[in-house]
Image (tube, coloured by chain):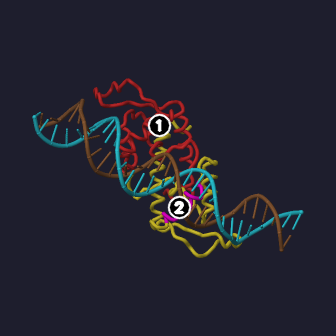
Chain colours: A red, B yellow, C cyan, D brown
Amino acid sequence: MVSIMLTAAGFHVLLALAGGHGHGYAIMRFVDEISDGAVRLGPGTLYRTISRLVADGLVEEIEGEDPAAPHDARRRYYRLTPQGVDAARAESALMARMVEAAREAGLIT
Amino acid sequence: MVSIMLTAAGFHVLLALAGGHGHGYAIMRFVDEISDGAVRLGPGTLYRTISRLVADGLVEEIEGEDPAAPHDARRRYYRLTPQGVDAARAESALMARMVEAAREAGLIT
DNA sequence: CTCCTTATATCCGAAGTGGATATAACCATC
DNA sequence: GATGGTTATATCCACTTCGGATATAAGGAG
């Protein structure tokens, strides 16, 4: 498999961050919710994926914290870099084409 | 990652078969085309993925061949089993939800 | 305090991937 | 009927990624 190489887990993380879910545990819950529990990122995959995305320059850690949430010293917040946004867009477009193909094949009612 | 979990390659194969692309090489070209060349299943991943799907009961080999195509003794034809259709439907629905989330996050213009 | 949930981190065996290599049938053309 | 390019399937190896277990600890409710 080629391309800008996002794994499925990587895309889930980018999508969660694009939707404003800024720290690891929130990402995990987001993925669980959006998939109705069908996809579950365990801690191993989750934090490993985040650090890979940081190393690849698609995600960066930010120092601040969510002013709307109570203080929690354990949390580490992240956001997409411009390259991360590009990668998420490209992968979203690809996925939209596949959904379209699935619809044409009668797989979506 | 949980459930009857399809890998990305596995979903691509099911999608190609649902669209009527009945043998390995045709699947490879379908994936290449639908992704504008961004995703390429090499022979290793392709044939290994097919045999895994057969072992899991999502795909089955059929003896006949495409009457519209010239005879080619090398080809091996496949089709989705009912379970394969179910899996493809479930994965398509999940993917459609993710595309929807991507759209809400402004990732699709 | 105690206990449950939230939160991050790391380790290990298992699964999956990519690309190279191999083999051979098919087809055009010279 | 030899030659060479494309189509087609199969297998191997090193590498990456995954899932789940384990560890640690802060936060919050009782």
- Residue B42 inside the magenta-drawn segment: yes
Which labelled disc corresponds to residue A53? 1
Left or right, A81 with reference to C24: left
Residue at 48%, 50% (x, y): give it: B95
Neighbor class of circle 2 (other Cα within 10 Å; few <14, some 14-19, many 20+) is few
Q: SS for tag 2?
A: helix
Task: Tell me which residue sits at (56%, 73%) in the image.
Answer: B62
Q: Chain of mark 1?
A: A
Dominant SS type (magenta): helix
Q: Is residue A1 above or below residue D30?
A: below
Quadrant in which residue A34 is drawn: top left
Q: Is the residue at mark 2 from the same chain as the one at mark 1?
A: no
Instruction: Note whether B74 is above or below B9 in the view shown.
Output: below
Task: Report the side of C3 relative to A20 (left or right).
Answer: left
Judging by the rendered image, the residue that carries numbered circle 2 is B48
Residue C29, position in %: x, y? 86, 63
In the image, residue A53 lies in the stretch drawn in magenta:
no
Query: Mark 1: which amino acid?
Result: Leu
Name the residue at 35% across, 27% down: A66
- Give the residue type at disc 2: Arg
Q: CA distance from mark 2 to mark 1?
A: 28 Å
Q: Residue C4, position in %: x, y? A: 19, 43
The stretch in magenta equals: B41-53
Query: Which subunit holds the residue at mark 2?
Result: B
Say which quadrant the C terminus of chain B sits in: top right
Q: Is residue D11 above or below residue A58?
A: below
Q: Element at badge 1? A: helix
Report if the CB atoms under discs 2 and 1 are less than 8 Å apart.
Answer: no
Q: Reply above or below: C21 against B81.
A: above
In x, y percent, where is residue A108? 49, 56
Q: Residue at x 45, y 62 (%)?
A: B86
